[in-house]
Amino acid sequence: MKKINIILFLVYFTLGLSQEANLKDLYSKKEYDKAIKLAQTNLISSPEDFETQLMLLKIYNSKCDYPAANALLTKMDSSDAKFLIESLKTNYGLGNTKEAKRIYDQLIKNSKNEVLKNELLKFGLVTGLDPIYDDWKIKETQNIVFHFQQSVSAEKMQNIVASRQKAFEKINNFFNSVLPKKIDFFVWDMEESYNSYLKTNLGFTFAQFCISHNRINQSPGHEIAHNISFWKTPEQKKIIFINEGIGVYFDQQGNNRLEAAKEAYRKDPANIKEIWQNKRRAEESIMYPIAGAFIEYLIQYDKEKFLQLTEDQTYENAVKVYDEKIDKLIEDFLKTLESH
Ligand SMILES: [Zn+2]
């Protein structure tokens, strides 16, 4: 009898362990939907299993499904740092900024782990939870929360608020995306690219959390387009050539995109297929205008197909979406660039 119990225990123990390993494995492979199903199955037999709950919470956050994460959060409670970090992400992702700030401050105060603390400080700088933003001016519209560095003049602020809100409406008229919160739109009073606080070049977008950091002299729509196109499908497969083309096409500058692309192409007759597949890098000053005009070309060709390409931007997906005609489309586009 005892023997059987031991065997049963061993079987149960090994099964339990392998399920946990499986869950982590699926998560690291980004197979979120499978991981969610497995975690939910595990939770039926042991609903209070904190490790599985925490894993599920992490998966929801990585999938940018903040409402599902929030529903799970209400059933959990812990002062464990790993749990608080997930709770921080969920709250920020839903736009519960006050609660996110409270958790953030608590984590920073109590954190004894230097690596974790550094990660948190980086997160705070990008999300606006860091105290350096305490004296920034905040303006809010229907879709955007603006954060202005103190020195930005009232006139510039007004101009940026109006033009960016308008850009949001125009761009989302096209995509019809649903964002989980307003875009946190940071405007630094600087024209040069390198930002020494963030230790990176501006502008950039962190679409998972609807955040953009901008220079004062950026186009109205570029960073907003990155946020909106991402939320068409948060599991988007992003490729730099298509993604930046979207940024350029929707920048709301009113430039002649074809002319700009022709000029770039004259300087460097870039091979689109190689750049698209990341086999060759091209200077931003060449790639951006060409990508912008190419997106214009694809949208005029077929909007629905273009929307499918937005979700999975790989060249391989384009072959499928455009019924194996993508090489011909690239060829025709290049002819328009070569024409006078
Ligand atoms: Zn961009």
Image (spheres, helix red, strand yellow):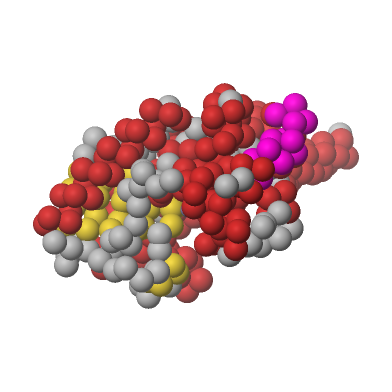
Residue at 40% over, 69% down:
193
Residue 122: which quarter of the image? bottom left
Front-lying residue, 16 or 220:
220
Specify the principal SS of the magenta part.
helix
Q: Is residue 336 visible?
A: yes
Front-lying residue, 142 or 286:
286
- Magenta stretch encompasses residue 187: no
Residue at 60% over, 56% down:
265
Q: Is residue 272 above or below residue 116?
A: above
Report whether 129 appears left or right of 87.
left
Q: Is residue 140 above or below residue 119?
A: above
Residue 29 locus on image (x, y percent): 70, 46
- Magenta stretch encompasses residue 327: yes
> Where, quadrant-wise, is the N terminus in this rendering?
top right
Q: Is residue 92 above or below residue 115?
A: above
Residue 244 locus on image (x, y percent): 52, 50
Report whether 226 appears left or right of 106.
right
Report whether 141 appears left or right of 63.
left
Residue at 43% over, 53% down:
205
Report whether 53 appears left or right of 174.
right
Residue 50 locus on image (x, y percent): 54, 43
Q: Start and end of the magenta stretch?
A: 322-334
Residue at 38% over, 28% down:
173
